[in-house]
C-alpha cells in the first residue's frame, strides 16, 4: 500500500490514472488557494469570505496530508539508506522546505498569538505554494542555463549598476536637497529616484528641478538606456551561442584535405 | 458570370484590372470606415456627423454584399464538395467570421434594441474590419514564424512573469495598504502598479511610499529590465537562426572546381 | 581662381590647409548658430540678445555667400554639361535645398511681413543647418544599411503597431470616456495615452481608472514590451548578419571531399 | 622591509596571507566609508553621527598612509628608473590620482575654510574611492572590449541622438511655449522633456498639451524605442561576434582521423 501511495504522489513515477488525477487536483488546489489570497484583499460579502476561510482550511489540510505522506514514503524515494536518514534527507530538501513553509502559516497562529501585521506577513509565505507548480520549469530551463552560463557578465554588470546607483543617489541628493528638502529628504530618496530613472520607469513622484540636477538626471536616463541594452545583449548572445553550438555538434561533418575522407567530430 | 465575380473578389486569383480596382476600393472603404469611428469621437458639427452616418451605411452595405457574394461563390473556392458543404466551410472559416462580425453591429440594432453602452461596445467590433487588411501580413510572416518557433520560450517567460506579477501584487498590497488605503485598495491596485513597474511604463498614479514598499519596488523595477531583456533576446536569436538556417540550406550544395563532383555538407 | 575656390569649398577634394580651415570654420559657425537659437529662448540681458542677433546675421551672410559660391562653381562639380544645367542640377540636389532653406528664414522677413507665430516656425527651419554637419554620417552608414536591408520587417512591424494604436485608442476611449470625460475627451486623447503606454514612456497625465480600462492598459503595457523587443531583435539580427556575411566572404576556403584539393569560393 | 611592504600592498604580487588580509581590510574600509556618506544624509542621533565622523577619520588616515606607502615603494614598481622619476610616474598614474582625490576632501578643509555647499560638493569626491574597488573589473572587461570595438557605431548613434535632442527641444519649445509658458519656459525645459521622452523615462512633470506638441511627442516616443533598440543591437552583435571569433580561433586547427595530418581551415 505504501508503494502504491508513493507511485501516486511522486510526479516522475508511472503515469497511472490515479497519479494523474492527484497531480491535477493538487495543481488546482494551489491555484485556487493563491487566488483566494488575492481575492481576500477585496471588500467582499461575509458569505464569500467565509467560503474563502473554508477553501484555505481544506487546502492547508490537504497540503499537510500530502507533506506527511511524502515524509512517510521517503524511504522509497531514497532506497539504500535507513528509514530515519531517508526522511531527514527528504525533509531538508528544497521542495520539502517550501512545502513546510506553505502550510506553516495555517498551523502557527493556532499555537502562537501574533499581531495583525505579523499574521499578514506570514500569510504571504503561503504564496510560496506557487513554486510547487514546477511543471513549466522545463520551458524555462533553456533560459535558466543561459543565465547560469552568462552569470559572470550578468553579475559584473549588476555590480557596476549597483555602484552607479549608490554614487548617483548621493549626487542627486547633494544637488536637490536644498531646493526640495521634502522630496529629497535623504540619500534613500535619491536611490529611489535613481532606480526609477535608470530602469526608465519614471514614476514622476520625485524628480530634479535644479539645473545641475536635471543635467545629471538627463545623463543618468541616457545611461539607463545602456543599462537596458547590456543585459539584453548578454541574454541574446547567450541564446544564440546555445543554438549555434547545438547545431555545430549536429553538423560537424567535414572532409580531410589530404586524404579526402569524411571526418565526423 | 459567377466565375467572373469570383475572379474579381478572390484576392489570390488572376490580377485583372477589375480585381485590382475591387481590392483597392475595399481597402479604401475599410480605412475610411475605421477612420470614421475614430473621428466620430470628436465634437463635430451636425453635418459632418450626418456624413459619417452615411459613410458607415455605405460601407456596411458594401461589406454585406461582399460577404454574400463570397458565400455565393464558395463552391468555386472549394471545388469537389457539394454547394451546401462549400458554403458551410467558407462561413466557418476565420476570415468569414471576421467579415460577419464586422457587419453585424450595423444590422443588429435594427432588430434588437439595446442600452447605449451595449451599442458602443458593439460598434468597436467594427474595428475587426482592420484585420481584413491582410495585405501586409506577408511582411509580418517572417516575424510570425519566429514567434511560433520560439513559442515555448515565450510562453515559459510569460508564465513566469504572470506568477511574478501575482505574487508582487500581494506583496506590495501588504506593504502599502496601511500607509495608503485609498491608492492600494486591494490586490488589483497592486497588480496595476506591478504591471506599470515591470513594463517600465511607470504612470506615477500609484507608487509605494513606505521603505519596505520602495525597496521592493526598486527590486521589481530592476527585474522589469530583465523582463524586457528576455523576450528581446528570444526574438533576436530566433531571427538570427532563421537567417543562418536559410543561408545554410542555400549554400549546402556546391561543386568541386577540380573534379566537378557535387559536395554536400 | 574659380578652381581654387572650388577646391576649398568642396569637402571631398584635396585636403589643403585652406580647405581644412574653411571646413572647420563652417562647422563652428553651424554649431554656434544652432546654439544661438537654443540660447535665445532664455531670458537674457539685452546686450547678449543683441550679440545673438549679430551672430545670426554673420552666420546667415556667410552661409549665403557659401551657397552662392557653390552655385557659381557648380560647373566644376558636374563637368561635361552646360553651365546652366550644372547649376540647375546643383540647386535641385538635396544638400543645396537644405542650404537654401537654412538661409531663407533670414532673408524672407525682409520682404514678407508675417505674424509672430509664423516667424517662430520659420526660424526653426534654420535647424536644418545641422544636417550640413554630414561629417559623421560615415559612422552611421553601417547602421543605415542595416535599416535599409531590414526595411520590410521594420515597415511591417510599424504598420502592425500603427493599426494596434488606432484600435487601442478607440477601445480605451470607449472604456474611459464615461468615467473621465475630460481626460479621455476623444479618440485623440486615447491615441496619446496609447503611444505613452506602448512605448513605455508613461507620463501619467492620463491613465485608465476603470477596471476594464486598467485590464486593457495592463495588456497594452505588456504588448509594449514586445513592441520594443521586435525592432531590437530585427536590428540586432541585421547587424550580426552583416558581420557574418563579411566574414563568410573572407574565409570561404574549404576542401573537396573527392579530390582533396582546396576550393576557394 | 620596503620589499615586504610592497609585496603586501601591491595587488598583483604574491598571494601571501598578509597581502590577502590587507586587500580585504582596504575593500571593507572603502565600502564602510562610502556607506557612511550615504547614511550621513539621514536624520540620525548625535552619537551615531559622532561614530560616522570617527569612521571617516580612520578611513582617511588609513587611505593617506596607504597612498604614502605606495609613493614610497614606487621605485620597486617601476624598476630601472631613478627613485624620483618612479615616484613621479606613480603619482601621475590614473589610480594614484583617484587615491589622492579620495583623501583630499578630508585634509583640505583643515587648511582652507569654505562655504557649506562647497564642502558638500567636495565630500562627493570621496565617492571616487569606489573606483579603488577594481577587483570586479575583470568581469566587466569583456563588455568593455565590446564597447571599445563598437565605439564608432556607439559614438555615431550618440552623435545622432544628441542632434535629435537639440532639434527636438527647440521644436517642442516652439509648440508648447505659448500654451504652457511656465512648464516650457525655455529650450532647456524642452531638452529635459526630450530626454525623458526619448529614453522612455516619462516622469510626467512636463508634457505637451497642444495637438501639434502631442503629435510631435508621439513621434519622438516612437523614435525613443529605436533609440533603445539601436545600442542594444550594437552591443548584442558585438558580444556574439566576440564569442564566434573566439570559437573560430579555438577550433581552426584539427587533425584528420584517417591520415593524421593537420587541417587548417
Image (spheres, coloured by chain):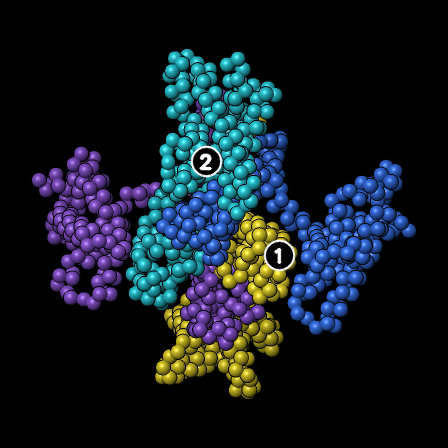
Chain colours: A cyan, B blue, C yellow, D purple
Q: Quadrant of residue C161?
A: bottom right
Q: Is residue C17 left or right of residue D62?
A: right
Chain bearing tag 1 is C
Residue located beneath label 2 in the image? A126
Residue farthest right in this picture = B1
Mark 2 falls on what kind of element?
A: helix
Which mark's residue is nearer the viewer, 1 or 2?
2
How crowded pointer 2 is (Cα within 10 Å; few <14, some 14-19, many 20+) is rated as many
**Residue at screen point 45% across, 18% down:** A72
Q: Of D210 and D239, which appears nearest the observer?
A: D210
Q: Quadrant of residue B90?
A: top right
Q: Is residue A121 left or right of residue B137?
A: left
Task: Please tell me if label 1 and label 2 are on a single chain.
Answer: no
Q: Of D8 and B53, which appears nearest the observer?
A: B53
Q: Of C88 and B209, which appears nearest the observer?
A: B209
Note whether B157 is above or below C185 in the view shown. above
**Residue at screen point 72% across, 57% down:** B115
Label annotation for residue B86 = none
Residue A198 in sight:
no
Chain bearing tag 2 is A
Question: Could you give the CA–CA distance between mark 1 and mark 2, rounded to whole angstroms?
Answer: 35 Å
Residue located beneath label 1 in the image? C175
Residue B82 in sight:
yes
Q: Is residue D231 left or right of residue C47?
A: right
Amino acid at each position: 500500500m505504501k508503494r502504491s501511495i508513493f507511485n501516486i504522489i511522486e510526479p516522475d513515477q508511472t503515469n497511472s490514472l490515479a497519479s494523474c488525477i492527484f497531480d491535477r487536483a493538487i495543481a488546482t488546489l494551489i491555484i485556487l488557494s493563491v487566488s483566494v489570497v488575492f481575492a481576500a484583499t477585496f471588500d467582499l460579502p461575509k458569505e464569500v469570505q467565509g467560503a474563502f476561510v473554508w477553501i484555505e482550511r481544506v487546502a492547508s489540510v490537504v497540503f499537510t496530508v500530502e507533506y506527511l505522506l511524502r515524509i512517510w514514503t521517503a524511504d522509497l524515494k531514497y532506497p539504500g539508506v535507513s528509514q530515519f536518514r531517508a526522511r531527514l534527507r527528504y525533509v531538508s530538501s528544497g521542495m520539502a522546505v517550501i512545502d513546510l513553509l506553505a502550510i506553516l502559516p495555517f498551523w502557527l497562529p493556532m499555537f502562537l498569538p501574533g499581531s495583525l501585521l505579523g499574521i499578514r506577513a506570514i500569510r504571504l509565505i503561503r504564496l510560496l505554494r506557487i513554486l510547487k507548480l514546477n511543471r513549466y520549469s522545463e520551458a524555462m530551463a533553456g533560459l535558466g542555463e543561459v543565465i547560469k552560463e552568462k552569470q559572470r557578465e550578468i553579475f559584473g554588470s549588476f555590480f557596476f549598476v549597483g555602484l552607479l546607483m549608490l554614487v548617483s543617489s548621493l549626487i542627486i541628493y547633494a544637488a536637490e536637497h536644498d531646493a526640495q528638502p521634502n522630496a529629497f529628504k535623504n540619500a534613500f530618496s535619491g536611490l529611489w529616484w535613481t532606480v526609477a530613472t535608470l530602469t526608465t520607469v519614471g514614476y514622476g513622484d520625485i524628480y530634479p528641478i535644479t539645473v545641475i540636477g536635471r543635467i545629471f538626471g538627463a545623463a543618468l536616463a541616457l545611461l539607463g538606456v545602456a543599462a537596458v541594452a547590456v543585459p539584453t545583449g548578454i541574454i541574446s548572445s547567450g541564446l544564440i551561442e546555445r543554438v549555434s553550438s547545438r547545431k555545430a555538434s549536429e553538423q560537424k561533418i567535414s572532409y580531410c584535405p589530404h586524404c579526402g575522407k569524411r571526418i565526423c567530430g
